[in-house]
Amino acid sequence: MAAICYQSPIKLSFTTSNAFSNPIPNNPPSLYPIITRFSSGFNLSAVPSKTQTTHITIPEPEPIFSSVKSFAPATVANLGPGFDFLGCAVDGIGDFITLRVDSKVKPGEVSISDISGAGEKLSKDPLSNCAGIAAISVMKMLNIQSVGLSISLEKGLPLGSGLGSSAASAAAAAVAVNELFGGKLSVSDLVLAGLESETKVSGYHADNIAPAIMGGFVLIRSYDPLELIELKFPLEKDLFFVLVNPEFEAPTKKMRAALPNEVTMSHHIWNSSQAGALVAAILQGDSRGLGKALSSDKIVEPKRGPLIPGMQGVKKAALEAGAFGCTISGAGPTLVAVTDGEERGREIGERMVEAFMKEGKLKALAMVKKLDRVGARLVSSNPR
Amino acid sequence: MAAICYQSPIKLSFTTSNAFSNPIPNNPPSLYPIITRFSSGFNLSAVPSKTQTTHITIPEPEPIFSSVKSFAPATVANLGPGFDFLGCAVDGIGDFITLRVDSKVKPGEVSISDISGAGEKLSKDPLSNCAGIAAISVMKMLNIQSVGLSISLEKGLPLGSGLGSSAASAAAAAVAVNELFGGKLSVSDLVLAGLESETKVSGYHADNIAPAIMGGFVLIRSYDPLELIELKFPLEKDLFFVLVNPEFEAPTKKMRAALPNEVTMSHHIWNSSQAGALVAAILQGDSRGLGKALSSDKIVEPKRGPLIPGMQGVKKAALEAGAFGCTISGAGPTLVAVTDGEERGREIGERMVEAFMKEGKLKALAMVKKLDRVGARLVSSNPR
């Protein structure tokens, strides 16, 4: 495999922030076959960074389409013991963006013309909307000053469901802008643009936006520099996610407050070993082992689970119905179970929906989805 | 890959103990292609277990050799963020056992006739000696009642060096007894026998004994039941360990006391993500990524490192000399660095030895060793 080190060809005057605490001391830069590494970066927090800034200006590209339509999938982050660093994309559910060259919009700017689907609560101010922020970020990276753009956002994902709704919008927007101008940016640049959006609307975490853009499973190895490891689930193996979304608004503040500041050493060792087992199961296409690892979190799920009515009963029902594992998707309230067969997935989903009603007095909807291996992509385009 | 579920064919009246806290709730038993699973088990602690005991008696086997000689390799445990659950075996250094059918020894018992090499401090009482304990354990598993055995132990590994000395002796003894009687036990049984020995002389941890017996990298997924995941570093890739052992007795009590009872959530997330990255690097044969992950521990190394004079300076020297990573081997004082070339490994070793003298005023010896992919094995045998 070739060693790849991504360096943005774009003018970037911001610097990488340091989300995790200290950088690895004296470690020489490494070249990874499977790592997207960002030498350029973003000033996403007030923490001064040791990363040097890059100043390279490229000529402004022309739009090659008059409009494009893009799609980005739902994502499941906080994968059990992969809390805060491991996420994956699920196929067949997500957000669409239609992006147009719009002479009514001031050159270099973007407007949001309409939002349909599950997004009625969202702001149309592009500076407050996740799609808008990501679009602007990509336009800046591309140095777009002569063309105005308008966005039409079709929300396929419910807000606050734990399925990476904001990341899907940001990913679709980032890809749409990039493709409209000829696809000059790398995947890594698009993740950075999406991360800027996530930071403003959802929090500084890449475990939804990275898989939303890249597809598959992605491990966030570090934020300074941002390093992502693609974990390829073998093509010949099947993996199905049973996503069960109850009619319940997860108490975001309580969910955050439920996270412990400290964990015991024994729980740390347990969860770390399960994180290792999870990565091994993904790379070896072991859906059973993957499910087991997903189910094994002793740190976050025990704290957050009780905030979702009936959660433990629903998990029990999933496992009894043959799911290999079950946990909270993102920060909930959606629960995710895994299996290797679609039919079995539907049965598991039915049992989980019943259990949500019985144990939590909540109506719920179940979906059975495959792993999305592609990530955000163009679905159609119109020539100029 | 075939699904393998190990079930000992042997009479075992003890039950599996619970080292990690709670078992995964309601998780159905899984069959792993890469997991050695032990349905039978050991009563290694006073904690009552939920695992059912197995009572199957096999006929006593005859010895098929009059004597055998076995070897078991050194192991590096506590692999950076893999603390307490990930270890690997290193080639070309380890312990030898010569095991003889001995009519002077009471049938069903074992004696230790002599210990050579670096083991002059070791007890010859088989109930206190790691080789003796493992040998007795295997004899019990095999139901040996009619034959007495004597052990000659050749210690190639210094005691208390952080290279899995006790595990090597136990592994070599377990394999020797099993092979003498026709190799009837599985690898998993041998690990259990070795774990009984480790528990008595070193502590209840399998991250040395499992790779000492199995070779390669082994992840300890759980102890109840004991589940091990073999992580295969690709055959076509090179991996070299630079092991630098200073003339210094690691303060075992201080080393243990230095471990924190609690870790911050941010350090937990960091170390877990690095553990995931480490597993990915191993499976993908990415020695650079492996080294980087090895170097990234923010929890244990920062506490234990200062107890080894000059440790930080030696690590710095290793990285400056081109090592991909460096950390403490086991509980030290040996330091381990990794690289992908033998010649480079020797240079790194020289720089580390110099730094131990300069920074820690300690004489040290460097070795460059490959990954051992085989584990404990017979090296010779004499027919009856």
Image (cartoon, coloured by chain):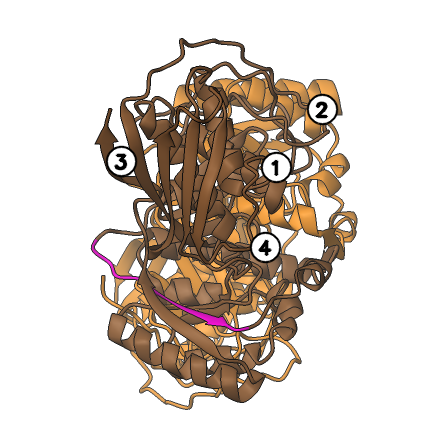
Chain colours: A orange, B brown
Residue A337 at x, y = what percent? Answer: 53, 31
Q: How crowded is mark 1: few (under 14 residues within 10 Å), some or many (20 or more)?
A: many
Residue A193 at x, y = what percent? Answer: 48, 69
At numbered mark 3, what does the secondary structure look like: helix, strand or loop?
A: loop
Q: Indicate which disc, 4 or 1, sits on the residue closer to the N terminus.
A: 4
Task: Establish if A5 lies above or below B374.
Answer: below
Can you tell which mark lies on residue A84? 4
Q: Are the two marked residues, 3 and 1, in contact with CB atoms closer than 8 angstroms?
A: no
Q: How far apart are marks 3 and 1 (CA)?
A: 28 Å
Task: Establish if B380 lies above or below A195.
Answer: above
Do marks 2 and 4 share a chain?
Answer: no
Residue B228 at x, y = what percent? Answer: 46, 37
At numbered mark 4, what does the secondary structure look like: helix, strand or loop?
A: loop
Name the image quarter holding residue B51: top right
Can you tell which mark lies on residue B91? none
Q: Distance between the residues labelled 3 and 4?
A: 28 Å
Three-letter code, disc 1:
Thr
Task: Establish if B246 lies above or below B107.
Answer: below
- Which callout, 3 or 1, points to the residue nearer the camera? 3
Counting the numbered discs, the total is 4
What residue span does the magenta drawing correspond to?
Answer: B236-247
Do marks 3 and 4 share a chain?
Answer: yes
Pointer 2: what residue?
B48
Q: Distance between the residues labelled 4 and 1?
A: 17 Å
Pointer 3: what residue?
A236
- Which callout, 2 or 1, points to the residue nearer the camera? 2
Pointer 1: what residue?
A334
Q: How far apart are marks 3 and 2 (CA)?
A: 42 Å
Is residue B239 covered in magenta? yes
